Image (cartoon, coloured by chain):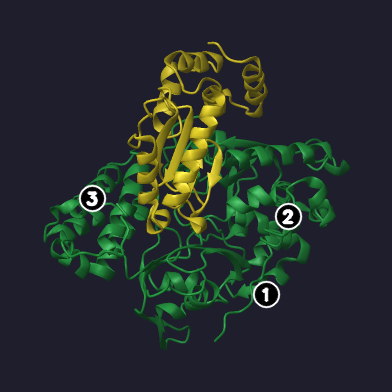
Amino acid sequence: MPAPAERRIIFKHIDEPGYTPDLACYLRHGGYASLRKALGMAPAAIIDEVKKSGLRGRGGAGFGCGLKWSLVDRKSGKPIYLVVNADESEPGTFKDRYIIHQDPHQLLESIMVSSWANNVRQAYIYIRGEFPHGARILEKAIAEARAANLVGPNVLGSGYSCEIYVHRGAGAYICGEETGLIESLEGKRPYPRIKPPYFPAVLGLYQCPTIVNNVETLCHVKHIVDVGGEEFAKIGTPGNTGTRILCVSGHVRRPGYYEYEVGRITLGQLLNEVCGGPLPGRTFKAIIPGGSSAKVLRWGETFTLKNKDGSTRTLAAEDIPMDFDTLAACGTMGGSGGVIVMDDSVNMVEALANINAFYAHESCGQCTPCREGSLWMKKITARMVHGQARAEDGALLQGVADQIAGRTICAFGEACSWPTQSFLAKFGDEFRAYPEAKTAPRPESVPLA
Amino acid sequence: MNLKPETLQRIEEVIPHYPVARSAVLPLLHLIQEDAGFISAEATEWVAARLDLQPINVLEVVTFYPMFRQQPIGRRLIKVCRTLSCALRGGYQTCAAFEQEFKVRRGGVSADGEVTIEFVECLASCGTAPVVMIDDDLHENVDCARARELSARIRAEAAARR
């Protein structure tokens, strides 16, 4: 079956010739009409539309956005904060970069709509430190919007006031974890908080109710207000609504970003048709479908899934629709939408050594299993790659990984152990054979660790 | 502390962005590092005093976040992405090419003080791998040949300053 056409909502103007990140351009394209509409609606009605839309978070966990908003403590009498997670740092993910750099007002408008809906008077955009131009573009956009009375006091004469400030991170992946991000925004080391009791919706920034949303998730809100929740829910597939941006990197002919209705395109269509297939003379070997934390898929493997009526169906990896639920049923996740492709030139021990080095570097060090375990997994795979592989290393790695997941304050414990666990489950033979394979020449491969 | 007047002005502008002054630790450290090149012990104590914190509250932030540094670096900072998507497209070779061009290992400063090379984690531009940041600017699809071109440009810019 041929791949469906792209459906660009969030990325409608990305790379459009003549489209600039300034307010005048945004207004020429109908900008801030959704904010005007939203200010004429009751806040509760907007939350209701977002619930009806079925929008799920695009940052990693796929949690319902309307549900997240409905958990906010509105009776505490404390201010409610909105924090935009623009700390885009999951390896393989590069979507927010383009929204921030090319269409910042789309984000600002969605922030204002969401803030109005949730009685937020102060919003922060937490942007990763490695986007210095992005931070400046956002600051300029905020100043423009403020001068036009679209942000700040008495927005468009409505009596509603809300400020937006940009807050830069400084190169730490753990700041993408929402409670770590909050600690960082409070000026501290970004050690994630334990839940319960520190659910951001109740005890977030400055111990006040706080909403933390991903950039792409928030951008959808303005479009939900435009068309209504029910219409939005018709995009995509049931339970997996809207579009999402799939970021493809690694060994394909046309890596890049592609926006599709959720679940309407399969992994095989995406990689073979949209991205042009494997590099010349190569075949696909392994796919990480949702950012480097997601469990790896072996190209060609099959899954037996249960249908709603109790019957079963068999699905090959290439036929998996790129949604939240099917990827989860196949033992991995849609995560952040970052699809990393590896072809048959790659040795999986070396690829895992690369991933393990990332997690060892980024563990915040708060919980012993993660701090020590991520470092040991890195050391073992690095030793294997550098000529001292042992037959028992696979079992050793398995033992370390199995003692991390579920024993840490935040999901980093899972994020750092899932790669090792899934690489061993899907490619265990390569780990066993590595001591001998290492000596065989592989001229086509590039160093990964 | 010998900060530029515009840095001091921006520091005073950013502090009121937060209801709790401690939140301004990261923005202040960014502004001081942009001005002075690194975060000195004096700077750590200055930020603490300005925000009514203990020096350890600032020092623990400086030592945690990879982008803050406690020593001066080269005039130009080359950050090569190390993470998987870039590595699959030759990121390790790109890093080695820069090391050869400036005769310095990653983490070090070249003998003439011109460049520091870092091998950093994901820069979030995986679709145009391998990527490199030189100071604030992202460079995409940087293979070894492109790395040599960018190195030549850095050397030419250094020569023009002399």
| Figure check: B113 above or below A127 | above
Residue sitting at x 57%, y 46%: A86
Q: Nearer the viewer, mark 3 or mark 2?
A: 3
Q: Position of residue A369 (x, y in %)?
A: 27, 46
Instruction: Give the residue number, with chain letter if any, for mark 2.
Output: A44
Q: Position of residue A88 (x, y in %)?
A: 52, 49
- Chain label for disc 2: A
Instruction: Tell me the kind of residue under disc 2.
Output: Ala
> Is A144 in front, or is A183?
A144
Chain assignment, label 1: A
Amino acid type, label 1: Lys
Which residue is under mark 3? A382
The correct choice, above or below, for A304 with respect to A169 in the image is below
Which residue is found at the position 52% from the left and 34% from the top? B156
On the picture, is A320 further left or further right than A408?
A: right
Question: Going by the image, does A29 lie left or right of A423?
Answer: right
Q: Mark 1: which secondary structure?
A: loop
Label whose residue precedes the other's in the sequence (3 or 2): 2
Instruction: Give the image quarter of residue A57.
Output: bottom right
The span from disc 1 to disc 3 (Cα, nearest Å) is 48 Å
Chain at numbered mark 3: A
In this rendering, the answer to whether B16 lies above or below A224 is: above
Figure chain in yellow: B
